[in-house]
Image (cartoon, rainbow, N blue to C red):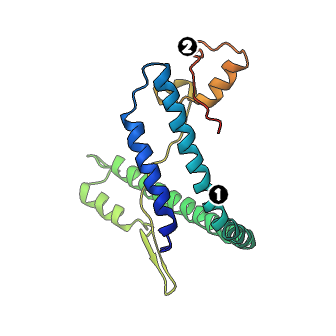
Amino acid sequence: MIKNTKSLVPLQRKVSVIAEQVEALKIVDATSMKRGVVMLSTINVYGDSVVAQKKKLTSTINESLKNIREMFRPLEQSYEGAVEMLRTKMQVYQTQEVARVREEEAKIAARVKEGRGNLTIDTAVKKMEAIATPEKEVATDQGLVQFRETKILKVLDINLIPKEYFNLDEGRLLKALKSGIEVAGATTETIQVPVNYR
């Protein structure tokens, strides 16, 4: 933790005072609007000096971090790619094996009924127990992998999915509307956003 924060104390005091004034300010007429403009400009000037001080202290550090990240990126991409590929291969194999076991168990369970050629419950249980099942945990001297079931999304027909499950891309929609494209169910509204010049 950086301990040399004494130089920030006067700045913090000034900002705190202005923040209290901002909280108390009610903009109800042209005079209070001008007071708001003065406060906004003052706060932004302080903000500019904070950003400048921070940039002065962090620019060389950030450049060093950028260079270090670039230096290690090829190594990280290489091992991350290998890890992802290996996990995928393990996942595919384990998923197929679990599906195979369930399929074999279902075939055995379907034969449990009375009559010749069918299985008794005891025989079915013995046959199911004899099925070679994949381990949920594979351990070696170097490491351990555990498998846990996870449900993932598999879209069968996007047209059948109710629209409540789709997220609206507001940025893309606004861009289309601004360019003059008419979109049913949406329009633009013009609001007044304060922009401070100091």
Tell which of 59 and 157 is nearer to you: 59
Q: x, y percentage for residue 159?
A: 56, 24
Front residue (pair 138, 153): 153
- Residue 2: percent from the left, percent from the top? 50, 73
Identify the residue at image location x=57%, y=59%.
92
117, 145: nearer the viewer: 145
Q: Secondary structure at mark 2?
A: loop
Q: Residues within 10 Å of mark 2 (few under 14, many from 20)?
A: few
Is residue 162 something one can see in this rendering?
no
Which residue ends up furthest to the bottom in the rendered image? 141
Q: Nearer the viewer, residue 133 or 172?
A: 172
- Asked if 167 appears above or below 81 in the picture, the reply is above
What's the residue at 64%, 64% (across, down)? 85
| Amino acid type assigned to the residue bearing label 1 in the image | Ala
Badge number at residue 185: 2
Counting every numbered tag in the picture gives 2
The amino acid marked with disc number 2 is Gly
Sequence-earlier tag: 2 or 1: 1
Name the residue rendered at 47%, 59% in the picture: 10
Verify CB contact (< 8 Å) between mark 2 and mark 1: no
Calculate the distance from the C-alpha at mark 2 to the C-alpha at mark 1: 45 Å
Left-right relation of 191 to 131: right
The disc at residue 52 is 1
Residue 39 spot, x, y in % from top left: 50, 38
Note whether 185 is above or below 87 in the view shown.
Answer: above
